[in-house]
Image: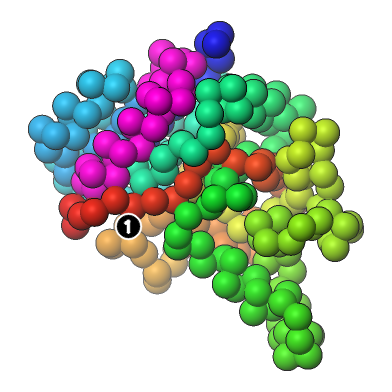
Amino acid sequence: MKNLKFSIGVLSWKGYDSLHNSLQSYEKYGLNLLTKSKFMCLPEYSNRGIELAKKFGYKPILFKNNIGILNGFKSLAINMPDGPLLLLENDLPLVENNTTTFNLLKQSFEHLYKYDVAQVRLRSIKDPGDPFHSIHKYNNYWGSGYLKKIKRFFRPIKAKKLIGTGIYTEKNPHSKFSKYISKLENGSYLITSEIMNWSNLAIIVDRNFFLNVIIREAEITNSNKKINGFKNIEIELNKKWWRDKRWNLIITNGLFKHLRVDDRGY
């Protein structure tokens, strides 16, 4: 496999059993060989985290204390070169083989700029892992039954921003929601941010757009809800600004599964 022009950034606040499992899958299915530009942010780091980063060829970015998800991804992006970034958390093992991984990543980098998208999502459709809270929310609004129709009538904004999640549950989401979902030649789906919230989970972004638009907006947005006392991007961008921008998003068939292994370390 040839190298691709992109960088990988992994955020791991403790949770080293999950991190080790994910890194082993990246090695097994050739992801680590596709680029030499690999970085790992380790807030509240330990020797084990540093050892794992070095063992698998990632440059460690170290913080003595927890800095939260927003600041963790920001620190990764600041240290990474311009161009496409593959951003991952520690509990996202790769579940596809070498060829599928290479081909989908190559297509995703091309689509990132061809369709001018805010993010390309790489969570597996056939094996997404748990938890996947959006699917339960989607079924509460778009499942069968009269009560679902009543919910959609009284909460149309909530119902609309869940439409994109139908890609993970419906057999032909582009047929059911033809006004909002288009299917691309490689099987990926093109939608806009009016029907799906921002996600941190296994994404490709352009570095400059991520830092200058996404991170900047999340930093200036105030919210009472935080994760371990810190901003996490998803919470801050779940608002009218994101929906009104109608950024293009691409949902691929995916490469990564959400899987936490044993003790998370916190």
**Quadrant where the C terminus is found in the figure:** bottom left
Q: Nearer the viewer, residue 212 or 167?
A: 167
Q: Position of residue 63 (x, y in %)?
A: 20, 37
Residue lying farthest to the top in this orientation: 2
Query: Magenta span covers which residues?
Result: 11-38
Q: Is residue 18 visible?
A: yes
**What kind of residue is marked 1?**
Phe
Query: How busy is the neighbourhood of tag 1: few (under 14 within 10 Å), some, or many (20 plus)?
Result: some
Residue drawn at (73%, 40%) of the image: 188
Residue drawn at (78%, 90%) of the image: 146
Residue lying farthest to the left in this orientation: 47
Q: Position of residue 40 (x, y in %)?
A: 31, 30
Q: Give the vertical position of 113 relative to 176 (above or below).
A: above
Image quarter of residue 115: top right
Residue 191 shown left or right of residue 82 in the figure? right
Residue drawn at (44%, 50%) of the image: 258
